[in-house]
């Protein structure tokens, strides 16, 4: 398979050999842009393109510093490289970004705002100007440095099991063991290891909440919530829409998740599940092992993506050629997974912590969906159009998880394993929705009450976890562990309020998948066309182009669940 995507892209505006080593390597280009006369349409357009090229290069420089640091959190040099950008480059960039924003708006030619793509960018620029305060720059710098600490703390966690040191993802594989004694032992080892850093993470969260609240106050807001909504560019929905999502998930989805728990308990021969039972299967079932090495995961993913659409396979193949994968778990590697768009050269980078499980396959399909989205938008002329809002980015990734199900035979050579893998995928797609609602509700309470104590925060989480966890799992005598369960969620520390997007996108993805089963290639064409829009249209317009609705209407969710449960019954599962 050849690289047909014409990447990496050739750098514009800056010299091809440009490297960032000092602020002097950057400021000369800001000065050049600031000195320009924008009196003609041609000059204005050239300014937009050259500004985009500079900002894309800076964004990619920061991206590689972050990627290398998260791949090896134990290397102090890589951490220093990242913190150099955050501590020495970002504070200098911020005033220049504000200056160029104001220059752009002042020179906006007549009629340009009627272009929908540019109008969206202008709205974001106006928002950036509204949020910008020079006195907040030191606070934001400190905040960015603090946010990176979570990865180092979590990446250093490991447990010793039967004389073998395991990373947390590796230990998590044993939670699928058919031996209940092993599951319980490993669950307690994981929980007790997390408990060792509970106070450190509580202190980190205290400092993050305080800084975020002070930044919001400094920008003229009463709390961090409206500030953050604007910072995230949430123009398509408000706080009330989030509350509506919470209520809809509790009303419509939670009962289905209870049935999943009941069915699992029945298959395990248990009266009720305990926390170490939620991923287990009976002893007579062969474990789902979709791959056994990083190379195999990449190769099979390329084949599966190519079966959906040849272009999708080309995307992953190109990334493999460029060395843009780091997929397997190891000690010292930051937790989680991500697809990092590289706006300058065009091809993204996928990072994850695989250990050979179905959850890892889901992560690869998810991050691969992000990667395809990056490729589909790489030809858009401005970096601002390629910087994707979370709601559409997650529509791309979560839809890909479901579209890939029809090609799971690439990963399994037995029809029964394929059916089980599809069941597990759909079960996780629905079961994650109450967790998303819980995390979002927790964040809203946290930042609406910035002066809360740790005890109050724990009590609030317990209340929320009970609301969205329901009655399917017995946590008795494990309340202390439940009270700090939220600490395992990276987003709370590193990207606050970036989580409900997964919920809206999951509902949209179920719609994309349903359409693909009903309309075939037409639905896939609509999906690709929607993703290719990037940020040239609003979130609601992108969803509409994909043929699905944005939001959490209970009746629409019931329709999706009816289709999904019928599909599960066709697989031989009733939930």
Image (cartoon, rainbow, N blue to C red):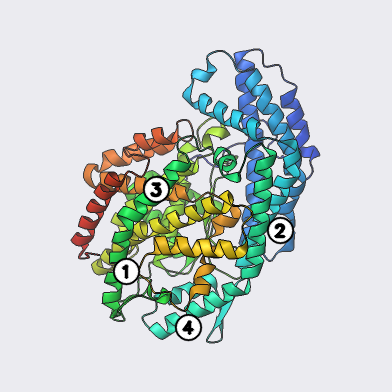
Earlier sequence position, callout 2 versus callout 4: 2
- Tell me: residue 459, above or below residue 132: below
Between the C-alphas of marks 4 and 3, the distance is: 36 Å
Answer above or below: position of 157 versus 364. Answer: below
Label 2 Cα neighbours within 10 Å, binned few <14 / some 14-19 / many ≥20? many
Residue 433 placed where, x, y %? 39, 55
The image position of residue 511, as x and y in percent, is: 30, 45
Q: CA distance from mark 1 to mark 4?
A: 21 Å
Rounded to the nearest angstrom, the CA distance separating label 3 from label 1 is 22 Å
Q: Which is nearer the N-term, disc 4 or disc 3?
A: 4
> Mark 2 or 4, which is nearer the eye?
4
Secondary structure under the numbered disc 3 in the rendered image: helix
Marks 3/1 in contact by CB < 8 Å: the verdict is no
Q: Would residue 559 appear left or right of 336 to someone viewing this image?
A: left
- What is the spatial separation of the Cα atoms under label 2 and label 4, in whole angstroms? 34 Å
Give the foreground label among 1 and 4: 1
**CA separation, marks 2 and 1?**
42 Å
Q: Which residue is mark 3?
A: 245
Res. 138 in view? yes
Residue that appears at 45% across and 32% down? 538
Residue 156 image position (x, y, % from top left): 63, 70
* Residue at 32% across, 38% down: 525
Distance in Å between CA atoms under marks 2 and 3: 38 Å
* Contact, mark 2 vs mark 3 (Cβ under 8 Å): no
Q: Kindly state the secondary structure of the residue where label 2 is placed.
A: helix
Q: Residue 552 appears in which quarter of the rendering?
A: top left
Residue 500, horizontal then vertical, whole percent: 46, 49
Q: How many marks?
A: 4
Q: Which residue is mark 2?
A: 79
């Amino acid at each position: 398979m050849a690289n047909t995507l014409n990447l990496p892209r050739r750098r514009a505006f800056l010299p091809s050999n440009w490297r960032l080593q000092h602020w002097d390597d950057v400021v000369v280009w800001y000065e050049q842009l600031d000195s320009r006369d924008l009196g003609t349409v041609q000059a204005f357009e050239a300014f937009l393109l050259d500004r985009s090229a500079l900002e894309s290069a800076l964004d990619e420089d920061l991206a590689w510093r972050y990627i290398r640091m998260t791949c090896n959190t134990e290397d102090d040099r890589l951490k220093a490289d990242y913190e150099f950008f955050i501590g020495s480059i970002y504070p200098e960039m911020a005033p220049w970004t504000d200056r160029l924003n104001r220059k752009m708006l002042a020179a906006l030619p007549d009629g340009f705002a009627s272009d929908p793509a540019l109008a969206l960018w202008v709205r974001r620029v106006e928002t950036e100007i509204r949020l910008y305060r020079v006195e907040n720059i030191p606070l934001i710098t400190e905040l960015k440095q603090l946010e990176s600490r979570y990865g180092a703390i979590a990446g250093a966690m490991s447990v010793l099991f039967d004389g073998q040191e395991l990373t947390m993802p590796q230990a998590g594989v044993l939670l699928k063991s058919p031996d209940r004694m092993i599951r319980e032992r490993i669950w307690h080892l994981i929980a007790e290891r997390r408990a060792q850093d509970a106070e450190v993470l509580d202190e980190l969260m205290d400092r993050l909440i305080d800084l975020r609240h002070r930044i919001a106050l400094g920008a003229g807001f009463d709390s961090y919530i409206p500030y953050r909504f604007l910072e995230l560019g949430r123009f398509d929905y408000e706080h009330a829409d989030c509350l509506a999502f919470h209520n809809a998930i509790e009303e419509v989805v939670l009962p289905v998740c209870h049935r999943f728990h009941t069915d699992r308990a029945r298959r395990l021969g248990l009266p009720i599940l305990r926390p170490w039972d939620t991923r287990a299967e009976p002893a007579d079932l062969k474990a789902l092992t979709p791959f056994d090495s990083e190379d195999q995961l990449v190769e099979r993913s390329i084949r599966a993506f190519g079966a959906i659409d040849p272009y999708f396979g080309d995307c992953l193949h190109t990334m493999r050629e460029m060395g843009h994968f780091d997929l397997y778990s190891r000690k010292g590697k930051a937790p989680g997974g991500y697809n990092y768009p590289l706006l300058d050269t065009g091809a993204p980078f996928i990072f994850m912590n695989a250990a050979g499980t179905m959850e890892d396959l889901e992560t690869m399909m998810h991050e691969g969906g992000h990667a395809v989205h990056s490729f589909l938008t790489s030809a858009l002329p401005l970096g601002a159009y390629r910087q994707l809002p979370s709601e559409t980015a997650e529509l791309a990734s979560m839809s890909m998880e479901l579209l890939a199900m029809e090609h799971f035979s690439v990963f399994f050579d037995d029809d029964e394993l394929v059916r089980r893998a599809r069941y597990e995928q759909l079960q996780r797609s629905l079961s994650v929705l109450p967790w998303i609602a819980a995390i979002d509700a927790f964040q809203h309470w946290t930042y609406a009450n910035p002066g809360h104590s740790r005890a109050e925060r724990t009590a609030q989480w317990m209340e929320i976890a009970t609301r969205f966890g329901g009655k399917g799992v017995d946590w008795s005598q494990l309340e202390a562990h439940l009270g700090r369960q939220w600490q395992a969620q990276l987003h709370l520390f590193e990207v606050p309020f970036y989580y409900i997007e997964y919920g809206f996108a999951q509902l949209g993805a179920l719609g994309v998948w349903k359409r693909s089963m009903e309309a075939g290639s037409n639905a896939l064409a609509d999906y690709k066309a929607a993703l290719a829009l990037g940020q040239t249209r609003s979130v609601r317009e992108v969803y509409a182009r994909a043929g699905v609705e944005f939001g959490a209407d209970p009746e629409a969710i019931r329709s999706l669940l009816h289709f999904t449960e019928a599909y599960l019954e066709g697989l031989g599962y009733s939930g």
